[in-house]
Amino acid sequence: MNSIETHGLSKQYGNALRVKHLDLCVPEGCIYGFLGPNGAGKSTTLKMILGLVRPTQGSIEVLGQPMARANRLAVLKQVGSLIESPSYYGHLTGEENLRIVQMLRGVPEKNIREVLQIVRLDNQQGKQVAHYSLGMKQRLGLAAALLGYPKLLILDEPTNGLDPAGIQEMRELIRELPARFDMTVVVSSHLLSEIDQMADHVGIIQEGELIFQDTLTHLHDRSQHHLALRTANTPVAQTLLTQRHIPCTAEQDYLILPLLDDGQAADLIRFLTKNRLDVIRLEERQKSLEDIFLELTGKAASL
């Protein structure tokens, strides 16, 4: 079973279609990275999945049940979420804030102590939240989302604004959740490097459209090795390579061709120099995930 499925999900504000016919598929038990530039429609999509925003068009299934007005509360009892930034009462302690959530959700009181240990706040539970650091507030928000040990956890930009140590700590917490508690985690981010270190499935959204959805392994497969050849005359080199039936494409001052073994590369250089064409450089390249992300989104977005 998929934990989340959407079909043709769309949201329009005025004349602007912010989310366009999204078909999301989040496998059960995975960490799903929902990736896209700022303003791409990530938060709007997650709010529609949680029933906080009404879709203009399309359908949503969460944990095998349609997200509708009649059963929304029953579905949400199995879902935890942290959208945009954590909410808290600054004059209360961390434990007191969680006690309010615990009573509202009707979960056992012992869960408070357990989730404080999970997010490593058990030594700070008696401190007023107003005096928490930003990273501690984010972890308190995660603790509140975990209180009912949900089957599905949705986190919107959970590392936003954190320093490197806080990012690493949050990343480690998230990575251990599926195996430890048998839950599915959806994490949105505009930081490809973060998703790469947390997720095993990824969906990329650009201007409200889903432009890639698959495993992270398949995204990595797009970064295949290739050779970049620079000569004294690119058009002549391209003609010569075509004569040798070696596929190539021009890219700035280089010709991009498939990866060759050492013997084939040496033969190619001899062939070009025999035709009085100077070889300036032949180098092996591999596209980074950032390069692939930029190709997919078509713009220099935040990475």
Image (spheres, grey):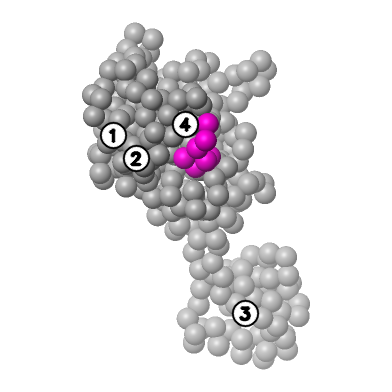
Kindly state the secondary structure of the residue where label 2 is placed.
loop
What is the three-letter code of the residue carrying label 4?
A: Gln
Q: Residues within 10 Å of mark 3 (few under 14, many from 20)?
A: some
- Do tag 1 and tag 2 residues touch (Cβ < 8 Å)? yes
Pointer 1 or 4: first along the chain? 1
Residue under label 4: 128
Q: Magenta part mainly helix, strand or loop?
A: helix
Kindly state the secondary structure of the residue where label 4 is placed.
loop
Q: Give left or right: position of 42 versus 27.
A: right
Check residue 29 for magenta coloring. Answer: no
Instruction: Give the foreground label among 1 and 4.
Output: 4
Instruction: Give the foreground label among 2 and 4.
Output: 4
Residue at 49% in and 53% down: 165
Residue at 53% in and 56% down: 289
Residue under label 2: 122
The residue positioned farthest toward the right in the image shown: 233
Residue under label 3: 282
Pointer 2 or 3: first along the chain? 2
Q: What is the spatial separation of the Cα atoms under label 1 and label 4, in whole angstroms? A: 16 Å
Residue under label 1: 113
Q: Which residues are magenta?
A: 130-136
Q: Residues within 10 Å of mark 1 (few under 14, many from 20)?
A: some
